[in-house]
Image: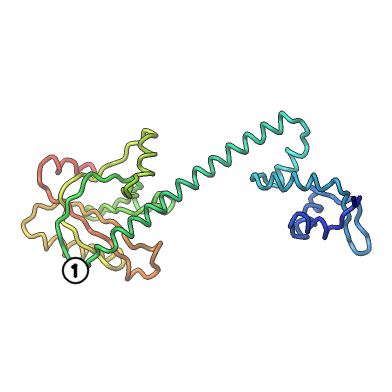
Amino acid sequence: MKETLSIGEISALFHLNVQTLIYYDSIGLLVPIERNPTNGYRKYRFDQIYKLATIRYLRRLGYSLKEIQASYLESRDIDSNLEQLKKQSSIIRKKAENLLNTDRAIQQKIHFIEQELPNVDIERVSIKEFPERFYFPIGGEELLYGDDWFYLNPTVVFYKNDSKYFGAYLFDDGENTILQKEMTDSLRFPVIPAGRYLCGYHQGAYEHIYASAQRIRDAGGDLDLADITINFNIIDQFVERDNRNYITEVQIPIIDSEELRELLLGI
């Protein structure tokens, strides 16, 4: 068994870049026992591979180099090390849960687009009936871009007169993964009331959506229509760079009862 290893041998043994080992040396994390003053060649004791293995292990668990140097490697007490590992495990589990929830939201957005896109007919205006639908309230445009819900869910926009209000549509993809989780956490979401809606599509930039909404209203003839317009962004800036290709479904509630009128006032 060799008593010392060169930096190249250590690099090959651990599949590490030589520059990484040089950096570990520079911060005092893994210092070679010998450094040639002429050519800078480094030599490590064979038993230093155990320390490097520990460093690799802790990095794999998500520890920063600062944490490894300041805490873990300085402690040789098994109880304190086990406690640190338990804490790190908890952090990793939380990160994994957040990533899974993010993936579920992404999958829901994909399913929403794939379900809605085949139905798009820009010229057609029709009456559709919907069950109750849930959304996460975001607020005005000044709040929109700082909210993660906006980025991970289909966007619903409520237009009333000159004001607009944004929400994240909790699309039912047949599994309700996100919605079920949030409901079990005792959160209660606002509801888009069940009922009949006069529906059509807008293609293009959002600033021209008012003209499409008016075209759809005009097609409704004598229908008693609410003064609110509910728009669902199907193709948006996250999947299409050219705003001329954005597609939005415009839905206008048809007032069939005073109860529905009252419910719409709450949106």
Q: Which of 219 and 113 is in front in this view?
A: 113
> At which x and y percent is residue 138?
36, 47
Report whether 263 appears left or right of 100: left
* Residue corresponding to mark 1: 123
Q: Nearer the viewer, residue 207 or 127?
A: 127
Residue in view at x 79 percent, y 44 percent? 51
- In the image, residue 206 above or below residue 99: below
Query: Left of 26 or right of it: where is 56?
Result: left
Identify the element where label 1 is drawn: loop
Q: In this view, does 265 lie to the left or right of 89?
A: left
Identity of the residue drawn at 20% across and 61% down: 200
Percent x, y of residue 181:
39, 39
Q: How many marks?
A: 1
- Can you name the residue that lies furthest to the left here? 222
Q: Which amino acid does label 1 sit on?
A: Glu
Residue 194 x, y percent position in the rendering = 19, 45
Note whether 168 is above or below 187 in the view shown.
below
Label 1 neighbourhood size at 10 Å, few (<14), some (14-19), many (20+)? few
Q: Which residue is drawn at 10% across and 41% down?
A: 258
Q: Quadrant of residue 20?
A: bottom right
When asked about the image quadrant of residue 265, the answer is top left
Residue furthest front as drawn: 1
